[in-house]
Image (tube, rainbow, N blue to C red):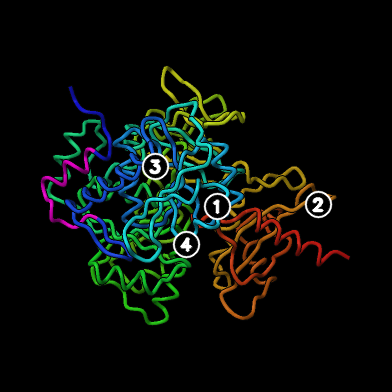
Amino acid sequence: MTEPLNPTGVIARLATLRPHADAVVDDHGRVDRAGLQTRVRRADGWLAELGIGTGARFGLQLGNRIDTVALLLAAWSRDATPVNINRRYRACEVAGLVRSHDLAALVTEQDRLEEFDEIVGDGRGLAGHAAAGVTVVAPIRDRPVPATRVEYALLTGGTTGAPRLVAWTLRDIVLAAMYPRSHPDVSPDPDVLVRRSASGGERTLVAAPMDHAFGQWVTLAVLLGGGTAVLADRRPLDPEHLLALAERERCDAMNVSGQAFAGRLVEALDGGAPAPARLRQLITGGAPTLDATKRALWQHMPELEIVEGIGSSETGTLGRATQHASCPGSLAPRFVPTSGTMVVEDDLSAAEPGRLGRLARVGPVSLGYLDDRPDNRFAVVDGRRMAVLDDAAGLEPDGTFLLHGRLDRVINTGGEKVHPDEVETVLARHPEVTDCVVVGVPDETFGQRVVAVVKPAGPTFDEETVRRFARSRLAGYKVPGRMVVVAGIPRLDSGKVDLAAARAIADRGREEQAP
């Protein structure tokens, strides 16, 4: 009988084949594959001492570190469930998650223990490696007992509201999000995965944070592919450090969170930072990357392949778009769908090419949310589980798909529907615009009015010139009636736009211009 598809088991088997190959590098050190197994056993001891076993959940509030990887693998080996917690969350926010999701322990950094004094029990903790920011596993006071057994859990970033805990089986999350990109297809057989990864894989710098899905998934995919994960943990983002780290560690690929990270890399390169000699691939996700940023990257690294991914906590990876410097015209990504990805009509039937529908996936998708809040994202169609997103997409005749923005972001102005992503794409093509986000603000006459929050490319910004540019490419009702200039677009740690902050900026601008 074939063993279950568990990342811990696969990575342990790969360690026996090439024990001295680099496995994980972080800002504090490095471990080879055998050394990673030693760290996993130590992390397993921490969890065992606190009684965290089958069915128990614990909060994991660490960044891109070897200990993060070791604790994930140790937890899955003992049927416990780590829950990612944003490192920016403060004590009151973490306390809410502890209550909501039955967390039995908190893994954090030692210098934060005092902050969490009201949450963790009697100061008892188990220290990790002796480096800056020592890892501590601390028990929760009055430890709760989870009502539902979950193999893999992911706390969403709250893009569309309050964060929610998404439940998966380990098998399905590997197939949907952690399977190595270099493999020709996806197989649920761990023997196939080990055989394909036995000879080793790429050295990938992971800059996206591991307390979010994208960074975690890429790290595990690299290790399951037999490669080396180079974890960058400096916050705030230090682009010069990323480039130097990629050069020092001879990285073939780098993973970043969309425009927020890629734009900073361009600034560093423009400022004289040398491009890494071996870097051939930039993997972006979590948020779009602007056309101008891609072309600027190619000015410094003409051979660079830019791979944009699209996915969600509920579906895993839905598609990838690969682009090169030779790509003509618009660089709007045309995504090649992963297995099971489709565009559906409102009745969940498959949409025909040319029609706008909702992005969905059948097959290996999440089990749903671990809360009582209503949702309409999951269904069973023809006996197969389907997850349906609020992302508008259009299927192309060649089988690729284009994104048309989130349906829950659509602006209704005077009865006309405006997709902000379409407007943002046009604005970003103007040389005076470095970055932007388009939102709707309340309007007594039209219900909502289209407003752009813009980061200009230089010290001056001619709003009317940019508006004329947009008007020549968009219907009049889509053109922003006003543009609010800012020093930087507000973004979450994941790289996604902080829409609540952007709307607040647009609203303040509206109030300032009111008669």
Q: Nearer the viewer, mark 2 or mark 4?
A: 4
Q: Quadrant of residue 230?
A: bottom left
The percent position of residue 16, horizontal first and vertical second, equals: 12, 45
Q: Earlier in the sequence, mark 4 or mark 1?
A: 4
Magenta-highlighted residues: 9-23
Q: Earlier in the sequence, mark 4 or mark 3?
A: 4
- For the residue labelled by badge 3, is the local secondary structure a helix, a strand or a loop? strand
Neighbor class of circle 1 (other Cα within 10 Å; few <14, some 14-19, many 20+) is: some
Neighbor class of circle 2 (other Cα within 10 Å; few <14, some 14-19, many 20+) is: few
How far apart are the alpha carbons under marks 3 and 2?
A: 37 Å
Assign the C terminus to one quadrant of the image. Answer: bottom right
Nearer the observer, 355 or 184: 184
Amino acid carrying label 4: it is Asp
Q: Earlier in the sequence, mark 2 or mark 4?
A: 4
Q: Nearer the viewer, mark 3 or mark 2?
A: 3
Give the label on residue 317, or none: 3
Amino acid carrying label 3: it is Thr
Give the label on residue 111, or none: 4
User: Is residue 203 visible in this depiction of the protein?
Assistant: yes
The percent position of residue 283, horizontal first and vertical second, equals: 36, 56
How far apart are the alpha carbons under marks 4 and 3?
A: 35 Å
How far apart are the alpha carbons under marks 2 and 4?
A: 47 Å
Residue receiving disc 1:
117
Marks 2 and 1 close (CB-CB < 8 Å)? no
The percent position of residue 465, horizontal first and vertical second, equals: 66, 72
Nearer the observer, 284 or 113: 113
Neighbor class of circle 4 (other Cα within 10 Å; few <14, some 14-19, many 20+) is: few
How far apart are the alpha carbons under marks 2 and 1?
A: 46 Å
Horizontal side of 409 relative to 186 (left or right) equals right
Give the label on residue 443, or none: 2
